[in-house]
Image: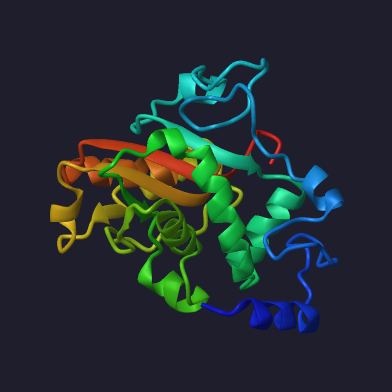
Amino acid sequence: MQSPWVQRTLAIIYPPRCLGCGGLVENTMGLCGDCWRDTSFIAGLTCGKCGTPLPGESDTGETCDDCLRISRPWGAGRSVFQYRGTGRKLVLALKHGDQHDIVGPAAIWMARAARELMENDTLIIPVPLHPWRLLKRRYNQSGLLANALAKRTGHQFCGDALMRVRHTESLDGKNRDARFATLTNAITANPKRAAMIEGRNILIVDDVMTSGATLAAATEACFTAKAAEVRVVALARAGKDT
């Protein structure tokens, strides 16, 4: 651990900057005022299945139109912010821009959003990338988020609990039906980790939930491996206008 003197020195040499715009901020874990206001953090009444915001001011427990139309195999889900504005910029910077300093603050936000989803024996796992895509990108952004969330909450983490066994094309631009069709049989439990999943409460972590097809495939893989319960959390929830 760095001493306070070293931390102060580093802060002078490398002053903390906003994760959204790069402007100077008071600490290394934050957004400037403008970027904070432009990040649509989800609060108040939200869908209990995906975390999308709903009209009203009561606690989570209602269900959005999408989750009423589409069967969600997981028990409950949360999201941190909507996939627009600075929120979208943060996700893309993590996913494609190697901006890993977003992971620490994101873990704090996700821990708050998912605190009611975690039990004492919860195993936190990420949505997997196919090996070819992982080789190209060099890291799994969902894995970074899941690992940081596990460290933040003290829960067990397994980065390779699930496997992408089929190299699927990008889901960008595909409609809901095409997304679900593309992910059919694309994700399975890692045989070497099946014993870790069996009988456990699982929390699956992803960067963005759009249609829910990827999270659904991951959830089904966990239940095939005899998980007791599966819940999900995403950093961002994409809406109909995304």
Q: Quarter-wise, where is residue 180 in the image?
A: top left
Q: What scheme was used to colour the molecule?
A: rainbow
Which residue is drawn at the image coordinates 18% and 43% (left, top)?
Answer: 224
Query: How many numbered dots are placed on residues in this image?
Result: 0
Residue 54, above or below 51: above
Residue 228 visible in the picture: yes
Q: Is residue 74 above or below residue 96?
A: above
Q: Quadrant of residue 10?
A: bottom right
From the viewer's side, name the closer residue of 44 and 173: 44
Residue 180 in sight in this render: no
Q: Where's the C terminus, which quadrant?
A: top right
Residue 183 percent across, percent down from the top left: 38, 48
Vertical arrangement, residue 72 with respect to residue 99, above or below: above
Image-based side of 182 in relation to 62, left or right = left
| 22 and 183: which is toward the camera | 22
Position of 192 compared to 123: left or right?
A: left
Vertical comparison of 46 with 141: above or below = above
Q: Is residue 230 left or right of residue 175?
A: left
Q: Nearer the viewer, residue 118 or 224?
A: 118
Horizontal and vertical percent for residue 120?
28, 41
- Residue 132 in percent (x, y) is at 40, 73
Q: Position of residue 158 (x, y in %)?
A: 30, 60
At 54% from the left and 32% from the top, the residue drawn is 51
